[in-house]
Image (cartoon, rainbow, N blue to C red):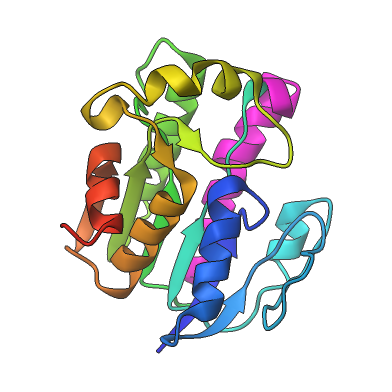
Amino acid sequence: MSQVLLTGATGLVGDRLLRMLIQEPQVTYIAAPTRRPLVDITGVYNPHDPQLSDALALVTHPIDIAFCCLGTTRREAGSKEAFIHADYTLVVDTALTAKKRGAKHFLVVSSMGANASSPFFYNKVKGKMEDALIAQNWERLTIVRPSMLLGDREKHRFNESLFAPLFKLFPGNWKSIEARDVASAMLREALTPSQEGVNIIPSAKLREIAKGEA
């Protein structure tokens, strides 16, 4: 049986993953620290604080598996510094908290194109985040790299609304992917890991796992 930590529970992937975790018989405990309180969710420990790091600090229960679905854009964050805090610092903080509580498997949503040497700011930050997690030497570290995410958000992202129809036509890893498929693939990998060490899963593979084809 598994005791779980999840950050990013109010986001597109995190919300769907949280609801799957609640229904999963193998999961016996869920801690989901957030900036604002969860609505219409029961059976979940939900410390909340506008400073997510403060909410994370309230998680003291033992953890087996941790998920991080945090992610924003520079436009939403408001500045480069705020983006780095959300997509790098808080992700690393989630991992450190999980390790401190005994977790052996960490699963994180990154992005297609993540590369610490990328000339593109977004991809560079994602790549540095991945490198920081790898340096923590997890027994199991699962990094998922979805393409453009599909699903209803509370706040629409202009670029996603503009390019989503186009990305649906792309092949392979470039093809857009439903947020629920990313969540489903992450849950499958958490409960029945396909390998030890670092496992980087591209978008096309996520769709296969979600459909039970992998």
In the depicted structure, whether residue 49 falls above or below residue 41: above
Does residue 101 appear in the picture of this structure?
Answer: no
- The answer to whether 94 appears left or right of 83 in the picture is left
Quadrant placement of the C terminus: bottom left
- The answer to whether 49 appears left or right of 116 in the picture is right
x 45%, y 77%: residue: 102
Q: How would you classify the magenta stretch by its main secondary structure?
A: helix
x 26%, y 31%: residue: 173
In the depicted structure, whether residue 201 falls above or below residue 10: above
Query: Does the magenta segment cover residue 148?
Result: no
Q: Position of residue 161 (x, y in %)?
A: 59, 22
Residue closest to the eye, 8 or 51:
8
Residue closest to the eye, 25 or 1:
25
Residue closest to the eye, 12 or 134:
12
Residue closest to the eye, 170 or 186:
170
- The answer to whether 65 appears left or right of 47 in the picture is left
Image quarter for residue 157?
top right
Quadrant placement of the N terminus: bottom left
Does residue 169 appear in the picture of this structure?
Answer: yes
Q: How many marks?
A: 0
x 46%, y 53%: residue: 180
In the depicted structure, whether residue 210 falls above or below residue 24: above
- The answer to whether 119 appears left or right of 34 in the picture is left
Q: Position of residue 53 (x, y in %)?
A: 71, 55
x 65%, y 79%: residue: 60
Q: Position of residue 25 (x, y in %)?
A: 44, 87
Query: Which residues are the magenta region?
Result: 75-100
Query: Does the magenta segment cover residue 85?
Result: yes
Q: Position of residue 75 (x, y in %)?
A: 69, 20
